[in-house]
Amino acid sequence: MSLAFKDRIALHYMLATAALIALVYLVVFVVVQQQVYSELDTNLRFEAAKHRKELSIANGSIVFAHKGEWEEEEHREVQIDPVFIQVNDLNGRLMDRSPNLKHNQLIFDDPTDGRVPLTSTLHGKAIRQVQVPIVEHGKPVGYLLAAISAEAAQHVLRRLETVLLLSFPAVLLVLFGIARLLAGRSIAPIAQITATTNRITRSNLAERIALPARPDELHTLASAINGLLYRIEQAVEREKQFTSDASHELRTPLAVLKGTLEVLIRKPRSAAEYVENIALSIREIDRLTQLVDQLLLLARFENHAKEVALNRQELSVVSSVHDVLYRHRADLGAKHIRVDVQDPDTPLVTSDPYLVDLILDNVLANAVKYSPANSTIWVELTAERNSLRCTITDQGIGIRSDDLSKIFDPLYRSDALAHKQIAGTGLGLSIVAKACALLNIQVEVRSALGQGTTFTLLFPAEKVRIPEKSPAIV
């Protein structure tokens, strides 16, 4: 059976409360029953003690001394709740009884349990009786049985039982209705949340869910959904900006190529002019190829991060640094940049060699690209408790503090117009951020405009074996 959410809440609440109400009803009934019978038993013991004094014991016979007066009282008075008295010997044989018993007898109980009151019937009506021993000279000689009508008590208990049984389903029905109403009112904000989310589309991400007045769980849910919508909106905006920037970056080399070729076909050119323009076209094609490769790599990280197969193996970060610096030796020599690699005994790490090389290549390439001639780049590796810290510091142009939070965005270049002569696509640090996330490498950036930049890479050191020290590159 499929029930609405509010009906399930009401049903569960009703079932839990039903068990509690049933327990309360049972306790009430037991308490009332004990109280009613307790009063009857008190009266019985009083009557038994009073009539014990009226017994006459002689020659092993136990009889009532003033039985005639009892008969006269029955004729003079109308007894609403008569008391029945009976005397039995030790073997249970009837010895005497009150006149109102006539030819009937009270039930003789086992002497071992005789002091416990019990409920029986007389003339088809309920009575409550007690049986007490008759003691003479310290020895029991018989038993006195006293009984009183229990019809009124039974009537009260039956009425109470009827009321409880009939009220139980009625209370449950009322309780279910109230619980369903309250549950419906409690989850009303969920309906508003659903309606709002149904109205939100890709072109309408700015709409937000109205927060409930009370800071409860629904308020937390609405806040979480609003936070999710904000992140989705930001992601869509970044996607739009990325698409726009990528289109612009791709259009620029294509426009240069088209313009160069159009100039070449307007009129015959000299061999030198053809060589110059073709060389320019080749550079633009190389730039376009590099941009497309970086875009594809970034898209691979962005859309298939879970599917990227990591070839983890033990490697030395300082060796990877030397490999990257060797590839950039031409640029370093052209600008007369000195690289100081400080590599004391550092642990090996377990990571993907290709991605580690990619990260170091992008960071060091930026350091070389943005450093002035005759400057120094410092690379420092230090072993920490469970990690390896790699710090790369340059004396370059630096980054404005307002741009530090944006440098990992795709196609973003800080103050690009101020250094048009420095080529770049703005994708390198985006690739660094994605690769570091895949390898669980923490990356931090500190920079000041005109004072250089420091990149810190914190590698998790799963292996602690110290490799042989490599020579520094200067």
Image (cartoon, grey):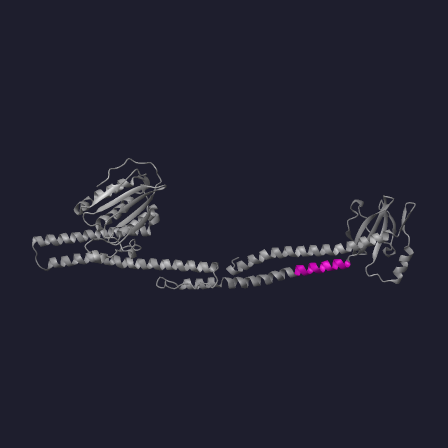
User: In the image shown, does 394 or 248 lie closer to the viewer?
Assistant: 394
Residue furthest front in the image = 451
Residue at left offset 70%, top offset 59%: 160
Quarter of the image for residue 341 reads top left
Q: Residue at x 80, y 54 (%)?
A: 44
Relative to 358, 336 lies left or right: left
Percent of width and height locating residue 429: 28, 51
Instruction: Return the x and y of residue 83 as percentages of the image width and height.
Output: 83, 56
Q: Residue 441: where, in percent of width, then height? A: 33, 46
- Please report the residue visible at 63 percent of the width from the left and 56 percent of the height from the top: 22
User: Main structural element of the magenta stretch: helix, strand or loop?
Assistant: helix
**Residue at far top of view:** 468
Q: Relative to the observer, which residue lies in front, 34 or 374? A: 374
- Specify whether residue 229 is painted magenta: no
Q: Magenta residues, as a range?
A: 151-166
Residue at (35, 60) in percent of width and height: 233
Res 253 quadrant in image: bottom left
Q: Is residue 337 left or right of residue 79?
A: left
Image quadrant where one finds the C terminus: top left
The answer to whether any part of residue 273 appears in the image is yes
**Residue 258 percent location from the top left of the image:** 16, 58
Residue 157 in magenta? yes
Above or below for 71 versus 136: below
